[in-house]
Image: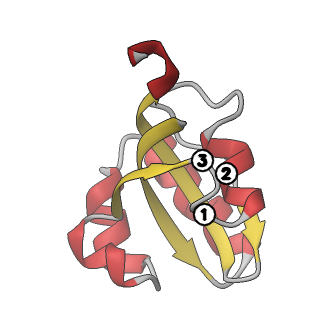
Amino acid sequence: MRRAVASHILVPTEDEAATLKAKIDAGADFEAVAREHSKCPSGQTGGSLGEFGEGDMVPEFDAVVFGDLAVGTVSDPVKTQFGFHLIEVHERADDEDDD
């Protein structure tokens, strides 16, 4: 199973997500922005979601985490049923390599 370690920031609007992305792109610290703005409880820990497997998150989230987003970069706003996310993938691995 494919696995990843990621963080995210969850906000209610695309405009807010885009504004926060611009701040991060300009040098703001992702974890600090998450603590201040994220509406998800994970915001208290800088947005960290820890390690999870493909299929553990909603499909729109998984598509970004296990898609083409380069490790260490922050996604553009991603819409899910919960709101708009900025996602940063820290690690991505395919456990099948261990077989």
Residue 68 image position (x, y, % from top left)? 70, 27
Q: What's the CA distance linking mark 3 and mark 1?
A: 7 Å
Q: SS class of the residue under badge 1?
A: loop
Q: Mark 3 or mark 2: name the one nearer the start of the chain.
A: 3
Residue 37 image position (x, y, % from top left)? 42, 78
Q: Amino acid at mark 3?
A: Glu
Q: SS class of the residue under badge 2?
A: helix
In the displayed orientation, state which residue is furthest to the front.
99
Residue 94 visible to an observer of this rendering: no
Write the residue at 54% across / 74% down: 10
Q: Which residue is mark 2?
A: 62
Label 3 Cα crowd, 10 Å radius (few <14 / some 14-19 / many 20+):
some
Quadrant of the image containing the C terminus: top left
Residue 76 image position (x, y, % from top left)? 69, 48
Q: Nearer the viewer, residue 25 or 86?
A: 86
Q: Are marks 1 and 2 in contact (CB under 8 Å)?
A: yes
Q: Which residue is mark 1?
A: 57
Q: Are marks 3 and 2 in contact (CB under 8 Å)?
A: yes
Residue 88 image position (x, y, % from top left)? 47, 45
In the visual, does 52 lie left or right of 56? left
Residue 98: quadrant of the picture: top left
Compared to residue 88, the image places residue 20 above or below, namely: below
Q: SS class of the residue under badge 3?
A: loop
In the visual, does 24 lie left or right of 65? left
Quadrant of the image containing the N terminus: top right
Image mark for residue 38: none
Q: Amino acid at mark 2?
A: Asp
Residue 50: quadrant of the picture: bottom left
Write the residue at 36% across / 68% down: 34
Q: Which residue is mark 3?
A: 54
